[in-house]
Amino acid sequence: MPTFTRKSIPALFALLTILAYGLLIPWLGFYWDDWPFAWIGEFLGPTEFFPAFRSIRPFIAPIFTFTTSIILPSPIIWQIAGLGFRFLSAFAAWWALKQIWQKKPAQTLSVVLLFLLFPGYSQQWVALTHINQEWISLISYLFSFGLTAQALRQSDRSKSKTILSLFLLFWGLYPTEYFLTMEPLRFLIIYFILGEESTRFWPRIQESLKRWLPYFFLWLSNAIWLAYFYTKGTYNSYNVVANQNSTSMFSKVFYEIWDLFYKSLWQIWTRIIQHIWESPSAPTSILGLGLVIFTFVLLIIYLQNLDLADSSKVKDSWASQAIFIGTVGILLGRIPSWMAGLPFKIGTTFDRLTISIMLGTALLLAGILELLIRNEKWRNILLSVFLALAVGQQFLSANEFRRDWERQRNLAWQLSWRIPDMEEGTALMTHELPMVYESDQSFTAPLNWIYAPDYRAGELLPYAFVNIEKRLGGSTIEVLDFDMPINVPYRTVRFEGNTSEAIVIYAPKSGCLRVLDSTYANAEVYKKESHFLTDAIFLSNPAQVKVDTESPTLPIKLFGKEPAHEWCYYSTKAELARQRGDWGEVVRLGDEAEKLGYYPFDAIEWLPFVEGYAQAGEFEKAEGLTEIALKKEPHLRKALCELWARVGMISGQEKAQNTQELLNCTP
C-alpha cells in the first residue's frame, strides 16, 4: 500500500468536498434569496447591491458586487462556485491551524476534516446567498487567525502580518453578524501559543492582552457599529428584541446549553442512521448507505497510510487546548442567533446558524477523540465513522434540494403553459407554493425573469407572487376585497398592484398548476383546501391572462430544456383552451393524453375535459369521465352539477339534464 504525504491532503479535501456536496450538482438550482440576488445582478446590475444593502448589512454589498460581476447568474455555475468556496474554507482552516499548532499535523487534520464535513449545516446548496453572506467572511476570519499565529512566531514580519490579519478580520466581522462573538477565540489562541515559551500565568495573560489589543479595538468598533444599527440606524435583519425577562432567560439557560452540545456533538452526526433505519429500502437510503461505506473505507485506507511524521504519540496539552477552545467556540458561536431569538433547529433552514459553531464543534470533537482514545488506529477508525456518516447526511440533504429544484422547474414550466402572458401589474396569489426552500418573495424574481425579460431599472416591478396566509393583514395586502392595493417592496424596486387585477392559483405538491375563478374553479370545488385559498378565489381575475399569445421562452440557463409533455402539460393547456372557449382543443388534448397513457393526479383535473367533451358533443366520453371523477372525489358532485348546467345552457340540454339527474343535482 503506497504511503501518502502531506502534499496529498488538499486532494483529500477536494475529493471529500465532491463526495459530500458535489454529486448532485447537475440537478441543483437556486433557492431562497438566491433568486432575488441573481435577478438583481442580471437586470439591475451588480452595483445595485450597494443601495439594496444600504439599510441591511451595508458592508456586504462590495462582496455581492464583486462576485456577481465575475460569476454568471446560472444555478450550476454558482453550485460549482459553492464547491470551490467550501474547499477553500477547509484549506483556510488547515493553513490556520498549522500555524497555531505547528507540531500537531495529525490532530489539526482531524479538526479540518470534521469542519469540512460538518453535517449540522445543510444550506450548502443555497450557494449564491451563503457564499456572499457567510462563507467569504468565515474564510477571511480563518486566514486572519493563521496570520495572527504567524505574527507571533515571526517577529521580523509581525507588523505586516498583523496589518493583513486586521484587514481580513474586518471582512470577517463587518459584512455579517454571524461571527460577532468569535473574536475571543483569538485571545485563547495567542495565550496558548505564548505558553510554548512561558508557563507563568499572569505574564502570559498580560502579554496575550497586549498582542490581542489591536484586534480587540477592531472588534469593539464592530460592536459599536452594530449597536448603532440595532438602535438608532435602519438595521433590521432579524427584528431583534432583547429579552427583558431575566428570570425566564436564566431558567432556560441550562437546557439551551445541553441542547446545544447534544446536537453539536451527537445528533447532527448520527441523523443519517435514523433516516436509513426508518426507510431502509428507499433509493436515497441505499445510495446514502453506499456512500457512507465507500467514504469510510477510503478514509481508513488514507489515514492509516498517511505519513505526517508528527508527535501525536507524545502526550501533551493539545487535547485540553482543543477541548477548551472548542467549548468556548460553541458557546460564543451560538450567542448571536440566541440573542436574535432564532431557534437552534437541525435539518431546517435555521441550521444555517450553525456555521458559527462549526470550528468550535470540530475542535471539541477532535479534542475528545484525542483525549479518550490514545491508540492512533482506533482513533482514526472512530474519526472515519463520524466523517463517513457526515458525507452520507450531506448527500441526503443535497437530495432534498434536488427535489425542491425539480418542483421549481415544474412550476415554472406549468406557469408558461397555463399563462402564456399576463397584463402588467398582475399579482399571482396563493396560500402556499409546492416548494420547501422558496417563499413568495423569492419566487417573485423568476416570475419576472420569465414574463418581463426586458425589464429595466427604474420601472415598477410588473409581477409578484403573494402568499395570502403570510401577507394578509399587513403592508402587502390589508384585506381580501375588491380594489384593494397590493404593495410588495423588493429591495430597491417595488410592485404596486390591485386585488381586482390579481390571479388566484393553486399549485399542489402532487398535481398540476390551476388558475382559479368563481365559475370553473370556485370555493366549492376547492373546499377541502385552506380557507386562505378559498376566501380569495372570488377575487381571481383570469382576464389578466393573455390567452392568445405564445408561451414565454424560459431561460435554459435557469430552467433547462422544456421537459417531456406529460399529464400536467395536457392539464394546463386544456385549462387554457377552456378559458379561450376552444372546446375542440380541449378534446384534442384529452384524446392525446389518453393515447399516451397520462391521467390526473387529482380528480379535479378531469373537470376541463369533462366540459370540453360535453361542449363538443361527445357526451358519452364526458359522462364516463364524470363518473370517474365523482367516484374518486364525491365532494365534486356540486361542481359537476354546475358544469353540466353550463353545458345545458349552450348545447345538449337533454343530455345535460339526464346527467344532472344521474348526479342527483337539485335545483
Image (cartoon, rainbow, N blue to C red):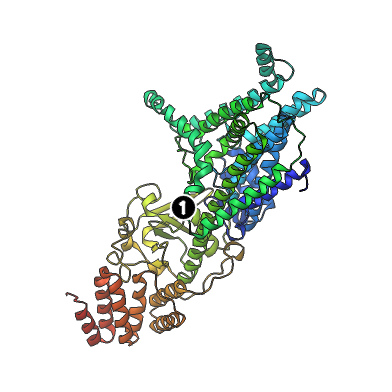
Q: Is residue 475 visible?
A: yes
Q: Which residue is mark 1?
A: 439
Nearer to me, 20 or 152 = 20
| Image quarter of the C terminus | bottom left
Q: Is residue 221 visible?
A: no
Nearer to me, 641 or 461 = 641
Q: Secondary structure at mark 1?
A: loop
Mark 1: give few (<14), some (14-19) or many (20+) Cα within 10 Å.
Answer: some
Q: Quadrant of residue 531?
A: bottom left
Q: Position of residue 442 (x, y in %)?
A: 50, 53
Task: Please tell me whether residue 590 is drawn above or below residue 554 in the rendered image.
Answer: below
Residue at image x 67%, y 35%? 376
Residue 557 shown left or right of residue 550 in the figure: right
Q: So how many labels did they put on this image?
A: 1
Q: Position of residue 547 (x, y in %)?
A: 44, 74
Q: Position of residue 233 (x, y in %)?
A: 51, 33
Task: Please tell me whether residue 317 is drawn above or below residue 81 in the rendered image.
Answer: above
